[in-house]
Amino acid sequence: MENRILSATAGAVGTLTFNHPERHNAMSLEMWREAARVLDDLAADPAVRIVILTGAGGKAFVSGADISKFESERATTGAVATYNAAVERFSQTLVDYPKPTIAMIRGYCIGGGLGIAVCCDLRIANQDSRFGVPAAKLGLGYGLENISRLMHLVGPQFVNEMLFTARQFDAAEALHMRLVNRVVPDAEIEEYVCKMAETIAGNAPLTIRAVKGIVRELLREDGKRDTAACDRLVRQCFESSDYQEGRRAFLEKRKPVFSGK
């Protein structure tokens, strides 16, 4: 059976590819589980400093759940619970990921695909991208965590519009809603995302880790922000050899070489 989740590394950049192009990269239960395992492997690789998530075939990032498998994977309450647990395991892994992530979106980014993109730190889309949450057309419940993550990006007014209408939004609308960071032509998106990833990978890993950690605390809905943990993350930056390297490189007018230590 063809591997539906692909993993690759190039220098400091790791890539996870959803590889089911004949079904617009629709996700099965096993794909959710395998994608979580791939993320764990890339997180454990010390050479990888950033991860790009993308879809094979150029027509879709992820078009949602594989509806052809609903009868076998989501037909009963127990099966739905098992499926949802796998989705949440992957999503939470991505939300808590120790390294920066970029969703490179071409074509359809629908339902679960949108949920994946929202969990990434950055979203770059091509001009042909389409976004939507069709839950209301399928009778599906859309849970608290999914709505919360989406609402942090676009606000309640656009969450309501997306879920109430269940229609698809084009790339220009997604940019207007602040759902994506950038929209670039399809012919340029791979180069654009790779350059962005390489730029981020060349910056100080501890600084990026601190930013991710502090942003995560700022997004906590219970209001119980761990300010001490935020202070520790910042202090680790100033106590690092990378801070010394950054200062020396600035004074010597050269590009710094950061070690993440």
Image (tube, rainbow, N blue to C red):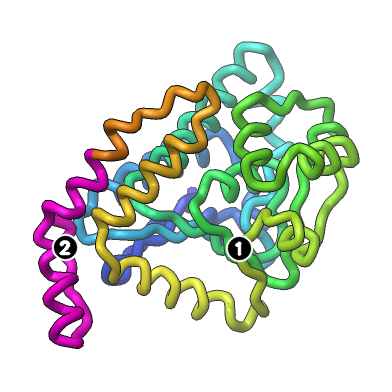
Pick out the residue farthest to the bottom: 253
Label 1 to label 2: alpha-carbon separation = 29 Å
Q: Percent position (x, y) of residue 91? A: 51, 37
Q: What amino acid is found at the position of numbered circle 1 in the picture?
A: Asn
Task: Look at mark 1 in the image and give the residue it sits on.
Answer: 181
Identified at 16% across, 63% down, the residue is 243
Helix, strand or loop status at disc 1: loop
Q: Percent position (x, y) of residue 257? A: 17, 73
Q: Is residue 71 left or right of residue 8?
A: right
Q: Is residue 57 visible?
A: no
Q: Which label lies toward us, 1 or 2? A: 2
Which callout, 1 or 2, points at the residue further toward the start of the chain? 1
Q: Is residue 187 left or right of residue 30?
A: right
**Quadrant of residue 182 within the rendered picture:** bottom right
Is residue 236 a member of the stretch shown in magenta?
A: yes
Note whether 143 is above or below 196 in the view shown: above
Identified at 25% across, 47% down, the residue is 234
Task: Look at mark 2 in the image and give the residue it sits on.
Answer: 243
Residue placed most toward the observer, 80 or 71: 80
Q: Taken as a whole, is the magenta stretch helix, strand or loop?
A: helix
Note whether 186 is above or below 117 in the view shown: below
Q: Are marks 1 and 2 in contact (CB under 8 Å)?
A: no
Tell me where the magenta segment starts and ends, as one range.
Answer: 232-261
Residue placed most toward the observer, 130 or 241: 241
Q: Residues within 10 Å of mark 1 (few under 14, many from 20)?
A: few
Q: What amino acid is found at the position of numbered circle 2 in the picture?
A: Tyr
Residue placed most toward the observer, 238 or 134: 238
